[in-house]
Amino acid sequence: MTSSLTPALTTQSAAPTSAVSLSEASRFWLKLGLVSFGGPAGQIALLHRELVERRRWLSERRFLHALNYCMLLPGPEATQLATYLGWLMHGVPGGLIAGGLFLAPSVLVLTALATVYALWGQLPLLVSVFAVLKPTVLAIVLVAAWRLGLRTLRTPVLIGIAVAAFLALAVLQLPYPLVVVGAALCGLVVGRWRSGLLLVPGHSAPPPQQSSSPTSSAGMPEEEPIHGDHTSTPEHARFSRRRLALTLLAWGMALLIPLALLTAAGGWNGNLALMARFFSRVALLSFGGAYAVLPYVAQGAVEQFGWLSAGQMVDGLALGETTPGPLIMVVAFVGFMGGWNSTEGSWPAAAAATLVTVWFTFLPSFGFILTGAPLVEASRGDLRLGAPLTAITAAVVGVIASLAVFLAGPVLWPNGRMDPAAALVVALALLVLVKLRWSVLQLIGAAAAIGAGTQLLAKLVGS
């Protein structure tokens, strides 16, 4: 990282939102969207590594404060976190650009793959690539859970919350919202009566008047984050009733005007209007990640509306798992196939259905962030909110670990029997991530190349 990206703060009370230009940040968000594999766990880990550890755009505490809020919301956490951080740095334009560029590569890639799928079905080359990518994604999730645990589980109480969250999801199969609420209540009670149990001895934050200079592993002082623990909130990020009213108005118009146009064009029960209403409900019900809401999507898209078959739904999930962006982006495949099947193979109709699906699925996420983030920023340092959010962060470690267990079954035991090749890929991916410290982009690229090379070699041998 060059010094031009994150110059050191001259005073802790400054809010240097101009330290990174909007164009420079936009290039980063686009790059992030291109390499955001690994589901929410991998994406959050990637955000932390790039923004907190490498670029020093914000501190660990501010990152986790934003993450905790996003975990409480319905919708894809990593997308909402990127939107929040873009908003924090450059206001509403920054938030829209960050969230939009985080999603755009996924939409384009999945639309292209859906087109290939609709025209030619499952290609052997794609099957081979996915066979290597799936265990690679499992390794990314495992490493993400481990690294987040090392950063956050610093007291016995937080470790206990993480273990309880893991058991609640993996063993008891409790609903994810219930786990989050339980963690928040636990943090509220502990923070009220024994707040020291949530703090690491000797690691309390220095008061705002003192200067804190973090050091690197080599003992050299690191650059102060642009948005540090004691950096004041930028003017554009402060709560304002006027800005709140304007944001709510814009959010409502972005929802109602497109819905009115779709209804006028095709009727209230037209295909696109139905998709708009259905995927708006999906967005509001998507607590607990994509896996918690995908059964509802499958039931509606397959059984209720008949937009695609059950087999096509499974294939779409496989595509969604191995493309960048949030897993809930599989709804783009559902929309594409719904438009394609209902018009007997019209690509423009399929593309229009894809855009409608994506718009109404992700619009609520942008609205929740842009309206609620100023209040969240104002709560920094408030123990009444900080303790429950700290407990939620601990629970997230258990949630990610339960996701790894969930993925391990179909990846390592696809037919009830151990797959040695998949286990070998997981082991090698863990090695290069932990020991060689490869980036996610390097790992995903290598996995895709190995999968493609395996298929090409098989064809050569077979011929």
Image (cartoon, helix red, strand yellow):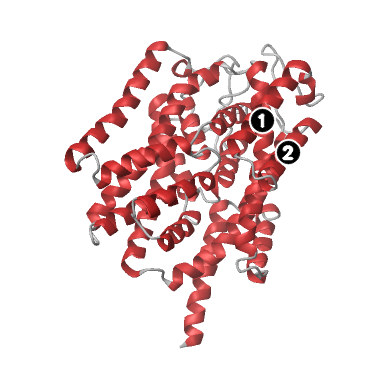
Q: What residue type is disc 2 on?
A: Ala
Between the C-alphas of marks 1 and 2, the distance is: 10 Å
Between 8 and 208, the residue placed more toward the observer is: 208
Q: Position of residue 221 (x, y in %)?
A: 70, 30
What is the crowding at mark 2: few (fewer than 14 residues within 10 Å), some, or many (at least 20)?
A: some
- Residue 400 seen anywhere in this rendered image of the structure: yes
For residue 244, above or below residue 141: above
Q: Which mark is residue 182?
A: 1
Q: Are marks 1 and 2 in contact (CB under 8 Å)?
A: yes
Q: What residue does disc 2 label?
A: 164
* Residue 431 location, quadrant: bottom right
Mark 2 residue element = helix
**Outermost residue, bottom direction?**
463
Q: Quadrant of the N terminus?
A: top right
Q: Position of residue 117 (x, y in %)?
A: 36, 64
Mark 1 residue element = helix
Between 275 and 18, the residue placed more toward the observer is: 275
